[in-house]
Amino acid sequence: MKISVLGAGGWGTTLSILLHSNENDVILWEFNPEYAKTLTDYRENFYYLPKIKIPKEIQITNDLVKAVTDRELIVIATPTQYIRDSFKELEDFDFKDTIILNVSKGIEIGTLKLVNEIIADVLKKVNADKISCLSGPSHAEEVSRKIPTVVVCANPDIEIAKMIQATFSNDYFRVYTSTDVAGVELGGALKNVIAIAAGITDGAGFGDNTKAALMTRGINEIMRLGLKLGAQKETFFGLSGIGDLIVTCSSKHSRNRFVGEEIGKGKKLKEVLADMKMVAEGVSTAKSIHQLSEKLKIEMPICEQVYQILFNDKDPIQATNELMVRALKEES
Amino acid sequence: MKISVLGAGGWGTTLSILLHSNENDVILWEFNPEYAKTLTDYRENFYYLPKIKIPKEIQITNDLVKAVTDRELIVIATPTQYIRDSFKELEDFDFKDTIILNVSKGIEIGTLKLVNEIIADVLKKVNADKISCLSGPSHAEEVSRKIPTVVVCANPDIEIAKMIQATFSNDYFRVYTSTDVAGVELGGALKNVIAIAAGITDGAGFGDNTKAALMTRGINEIMRLGLKLGAQKETFFGLSGIGDLIVTCSSKHSRNRFVGEEIGKGKKLKEVLADMKMVAEGVSTAKSIHQLSEKLKIEMPICEQVYQILFNDKDPIQATNELMVRALKEES
């Protein structure tokens, strides 16, 4: 199959290599022309996926129109908040026979849209039913080392989801299918905020008991929002829900958990972000969730405390204790 | 309230101290007369909960009849497989006004009974509706250090559950209530088997992705069994379900995860158990679940692979790979 991956971060690069090893014709698009040249010259993504070789058969380009022309499948692996601007020049591009697969996670600040909705907005000639998403517990660092991983792909048309499943699956990478695009996307987006909260409990010296209680309340909080937005309950208890939440809240690879941990230790958000080379989507998502929960009038106590800690300098220990007290009041 | 805690392991000792600090009159029963004397003399449980002081107001005894006489609440914190034998002498004791709270986790080998069912069998004069259970993500090592913890207490009569909630709750220990005794017990029992599987993936060098996928499938496997046994689906996505699963599969304190890790590294079960001073309930539960799933004709692939690895010397890496392949076949 002729495939382009748009975005040469750790995940985009990993999926390009995986799709190439599954015998597809792969183009990898990088937005920064200089870094595209570095990738082409050295065949290694030093910045986002060090020590993994990019096979020479993968074409690397900075030319967006060239990247999307005459492709059967386009994988969007661009940070959520940059998607709208990055792909403006493709507004009128004819995508009607192209399958679009979104592997980014988040909610756009301001519009409060999920990634599939941003894509449908920007790429006006995409057939909205062809926009799929893929999510689940899948750190790029591990997939690129061929560590067994299981994820889920969602499309309203199960046949398209199955086609993507067949394209991505191999010995170490397994893909389930689902028709619940909103549920799969929401789980992937919101767990990043819960992971910041989990990191805060780590950094502030709370225990494994505290963190597990917080994660449990976290997935139920995500589910309540999801049900309001038309997602299916079961999705949140699958790979793209608790699966992804678990890996993001506990893994040493998780950038969002790391941000939380540093904040829990007493650092300010600006300091933490200044030291990071990669995007922690949960920081933006905390902001959009704050807006979305106000708009929909849904209480999301954990996400709200994360927002207050990140953007209004609330004390992390006080916030965690408030969550504990609230816990008893609410569900007893 | 006049309370006895039967069993001076780490959890029984921790709960005795907690109940005493909540201003109850507490007796702690230890089955081994010599160790009961050590606990009385030194006021420290060197073996199971080192470095935590046991207040002198807590009476420690080896006399079972004395321990249960004239008590309002009896907390059973004895390893599951020993409950039947340990309490035989109380067969005809009049417990009809006593509330019994089970904090042990497991399924009895042979009878395939849950702890509340074993208790109803053995203590013939207990009012079965007074048997409650308490479970959730709660390592004794952390609760004894007053680290914020949230658990759930279940009784068919919600008023009894609320009374127990009020007795145990304090600043750092929060108790939710539920009426789903079977669901709460099953989550607590079966997560120990999934934790052994999670430990195996750690020991055998799989990644965080693999472990998160396994845990996700694990809770769904537990839930399928639970539904067959009359439990409520929601319970498995709460504190006694995913909450306890998360803490047990990820914490350094977890004995069951540790057993799995050693086996994943290539040790034999006998060697691992010989080096441990504490009971890993998951090993017995793996055996009873193997029997129970055959009896009920329910497929429980993860529990079955753990059983085969522990008791039939199956290769852990082969077993994990089989689970991965099966995953795709089953749920695609």
Image: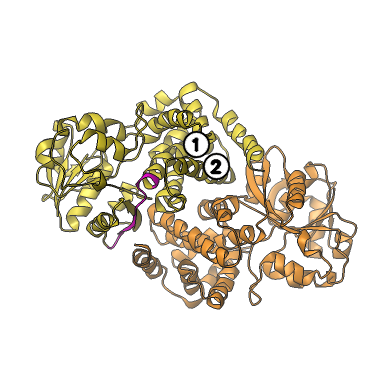
Chain colours: A orange, B yellow
Q: Which disc is residue B214 wearing? A: 2
Q: Residue at x 34, y 37 (%)?
A: B114
Q: Quadrant of residue B187?
A: top left
User: In this view of the protein, can residue A259 be seen by the observer?
Assistant: no
Which quadrant does the C terminus of chain B fall into? top right
For disc 1, the marked residue is B197
Counting from the top left corner in percent of width and height, residue B45 is at 21, 41
Q: Which residues are magenta?
A: B171-183
Residue at the spot 63% in from the left edge and 57% down from the top edge: A184
Chain of residue at mark 1: B
Going by the numbered disc 1, the residue's amino acid type is Ala
The residue lying toward the viewer, choosing from A189 and A165, is A165
Q: Amino acid at mark 2?
A: Leu
Residue located farthest toward the top when viewing the structure as drawn: B312
Q: What whole-number distance in Å separates the C-alpha atoms at marks 2 and 1?
A: 8 Å
Question: Does B263 sit left or right of A87 as displayed?
Answer: left
User: Seen in the image, is A248 located left or right of residue B105?
Assistant: right
Circles 2 and 1 in contact, beta carbons < 8 Å: yes
Q: Earlier in the sequence, mark 2 or mark 1?
A: 1
Which sits in the foreground, A42 or A311?
Answer: A311
Rendered location of residue B135, percent (x, y): 34, 48
Q: Which SS class for mark 1? A: helix
| Quarter of the image that includes the N terminus of chain B | bottom left
Residue A300 visible in the shown view:
yes
Dot 1 surroundings within 10 Å: few (below 14), some, or many (20 or more)? many
- Under circle 2, the secondary element is helix
Q: Is residue A221 above or below residue A84?
A: above
The residue located at (13%, 37%) in the rendering is B93
- Residue B86's x, y, as percent? 21, 31
Is residue B117 shown in magenta? no
Residue B281: % across, % down: 36, 35
Label ID, residue B314 = none
